[in-house]
Amino acid sequence: MSIFTDYKKEIMDAAHNDRIRIALSRAITSYRANTNDALKKFPHTIKMAEEVKEIKEKAIGKMEELAQQAGEAIESNKGKTYLAKTANEALNIIGNLVGKDKLIVKGKSMTGEEIELREHLEELGNEVYETDLGEFIIQKLHSRPMHILSPAIHIPREDVAQLFSRITGEKLPPDNIPRLVATARKLLREKYFQADIGMSGANVVAADTGTLFLIENEGNIRLATGAPPVHIALVGMEKLVPTFGDACKVAEVTWRYANYTVPSYVSLVSGPSKTGDIEKVTTYGAHGPKEFHVIFMDAGRTELAKHPILCQALYCLRCGGCLYECPVFAVTAGHFGDKYFAGIGAVWAAMISQNVEKAASVAYTCLTCGRCKIRCPMKIDTPEMIVELRKLIVEGA
Ligand code: SF4
């Protein structure tokens, strides 16, 4: 079957799947209420989002320069940095750093999903644990993420209870969500301290200080990047902004539109752990990781940045807000997409994953209704990008 036929079947099956609709309607109601409350409580966010858009517009035009600057800052702090021009280069760099037979705890990373990092590490003979609760559920169900922030958004509690009951052998009731969460905690807890390597992405990176910002609520990223002796971070180059101050603004706008109001944790990582507490002799590897490796990945981003309309895709903060407003996503979840979802996902499929057939399928499913643009803090004009993408696809460009 062709990609088009597979996609049509997948999206129609999803649209007739009541469980997806139930899970999403619960999530959409809660997202809208929480985000609207958060914006009322912190009204400066709307103005700050305009500033962030300007920061991103400028940064996207000089990603290579910013990667160089961030690399120097991290190296001066005794971290190691790498520039991967392609997804394969990124996989090779990480594969060489990791080797085989390692236990890896991993925080959720869309960039990791983009290059199928977990699958690659498993093929090399490593044991990989997704530690984000949603990703853990997806991994155990052998499914794939259906939302950029809430990967298991399409899976109702009944299915989670069934899955965890199967893993633990206990009968877990679906209505007791705290018990389901506690079960995942128990299953993963010891892995952080047994792991050889912790992996993460980054929400934003300050080039001047080489600081990675990691936003989360669960605390799994803190543990995954803090407990093992080695931390490896894979970062798409569009995450770079010039200064620490810029990165703080990007982070705040991201979490506010991501339904976090104030996140439980924001970790800032600029190098490996160190101490000078014994006779002021700097020694690396105190309580946290002894090694810190950052891979800045291009994989089509600098090319995309040159396109006058499609470059907007690189402004995306991955807050996920647009997905909650999209009428197609509301009934199909991430089946309407590729590695990234909904209308903007078509641009990523075409320009970054080079999956033109998938991009065309998604681009022609998009209604170009523009509801996403209204919610988007970056005011990314997805309908405009979709019209341009359709034109490029028809012209075979
Ligand atoms: S396109 Fe806009 S609303 Fe959607 S995830 Fe990106 S920043 Fe958020």
Image (cartoon, helix red, strand yellow):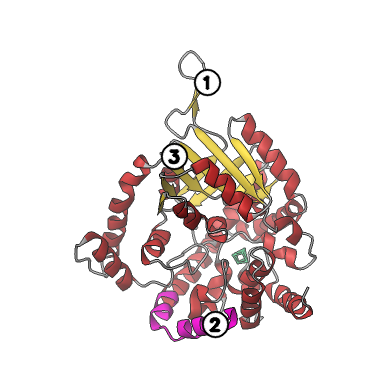
View quadrant of ligand 1? bottom right
**Secondary structure mostly taken by the magenta-highlighted segment of the chain:** helix
Residue denoted by label 1: 282
Say above or below: 21 vs 302: below
- Residue span colored magenta: 1-24
Is residue 100 left or right of 161 when viewed as pictured?
right
Question: Which sits earlier in the primary sequence, circle 1 or circle 2?
Answer: 2
Q: Give the quarter of the figure containing the C terminus.
A: bottom right
- Residue drawn at point x = 65 percent, y = 58 percent: 49
Please name the amino acid that badge 3 sits on: Gly
The numbered disc on residue 226 is 3
Q: Is residue 154 left or right of residue 345?
A: left
Q: Secondary structure at mark 2?
A: loop
What percent of the width, then of the height, locates residue 122? 44, 54
Q: Helix, strand or loop at disc 1? A: loop
Q: Residue furthest left?
A: 170
Mark 2 close to ligand 1, CB under 8 Å: no
Q: Nearer the viewer, residue 245 or 345?
A: 345
Q: Residues within 10 Å of mark 3 (few under 14, many from 20)?
A: many
* First along the sequence among labels 3 and 1: 3
Question: Label 1 sits on what residue type?
Answer: Thr
The residue type indicated by label 2 comes to Met
